[in-house]
Image (cartoon, rainbow, N blue to C red):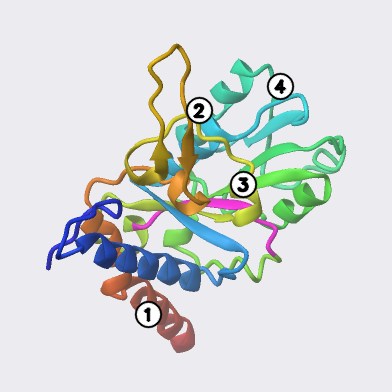
Amino acid sequence: MRVAPTHSTDHPIRSSILSSAYAQAARAAVLEFFSADASEYDVIFTANCTAALRLVGESYPFTSNASRLILPVDAHNSVNGLREFATSAGIPVQYLPMERCGDQFSALDNDGGLFVMTGQSNLSGLKSDLNLMAEAKQKGYDTLLDAAALASTTPLSLRALGNSVDAMAISLYKIIGYPTGVGCLVARKAFLAKLNKQWFSGGTVVIVQVMLVHEPGLAHRSHDSVRLQAMVDCFWMVTSVGRMGLLIFCRQCRQNVSNSR
């Protein structure tokens, strides 16, 4: 089978049409695995969880309207690295322990910003209280869940969390083992609309205008799931997620283990 980049127009084979269909099937498999409403959420494929987190960090509107960036004390460096985007925009960064500590979280203002949580510590294995995501939403924060470790050990349902998660970064290969080198950002479409990616490439735009004067010209960008797309090593890695049914197989195995206890 031949799989080509989705922006290819290889005629007469038109393998781009086939690739697009497989990519869409992979998105549907991811949404189903995490019980995410397809009308509310979309999937942006990346190389891994780190790339998904970086995509949010470099595209999130850190402005005066976002009062602060809140990070967990116990987090992977890929999460800690998000503070560089905030500080460069003049936005304060605050660290909070993910376990409940009195009224420390409730004392935060309601001005909003970006609240990031690591679902499971890479160091201790401690799992965070995901109810904090709902509390953050009530205070006007956008929420980002680093689920690289949590999703590989614990069933996650975005629907059960009451859609309190605006975006979730994962490494798919940590769940299914193969294919390696593919992750994704599962995010609410309303959240994706806030992200402003500063560059474009490949098939992330529909039309590009090149000017012969000192002006940048115009670029008509694609819809969010393509506009924000980050390159992965091979397209077949993404398409395999949908074609091989590995996510559904993993969920069935978890259910069987749970029922046997």
* CB atoms of marks 3 and 4 within 8 Å: no
Amino acid type of the residue tagged 3 in the rendering: Ala
Q: Mark 2 points at which residue?
A: 81
Badge nearest the viewer, 1 or 3: 3
Q: What amino acid type is highlighted by mark number 2?
A: Gly
Residue 152: give its label.
Answer: none
Q: Earlier in the sequence, mark 2 or mark 4?
A: 2
In the figure, is residue 172 to the left or right of 214?
A: left
Sequence-wise first label, 1 or 3: 3
Q: Earlier in the sequence, mark 2 or mark 1?
A: 2
Which residues are drawn in magenta? 163-172
Q: Position of residue 162 (x, y in %)?
A: 71, 66
**Distance from Cα at disc 1 to Cα at disc 4:** 44 Å
Could you say which quadrant of the image residue 27 lies in? Answer: bottom left
Mark 2 to mark 1 CA distance (whole Å): 35 Å
User: Is residue 232 depicted above or below 92 in this figure?
Assistant: below
Indicate which disc, 1 or 4, sits on the residue closer to the N terminus: 4
Give the camera-side residue of 206 and 173: 206
- Can residue 76 be seen? no
Q: Name the residue under label 3.
A: 193
Which amino acid, by three-letter code, is at mark 1? Cys
Looking at the image, tell me whether mark 3 or mark 4 is earlier in sequence order: 4
Judging by the rendered image, the residue that carries numbered circle 1 is 253
Mark 2–mark 3 Cα distance, whole angstroms, equals 23 Å
Judging from the image, what secondary structure is the residue with disc 1 in?
A: helix
Q: Is residue 32 above or below residue 211?
A: below
Task: State the separation of the CA atoms marked 3 and 4.
Answer: 23 Å
Q: Element under label 3?
A: loop
Residue 171 painted magenta = yes
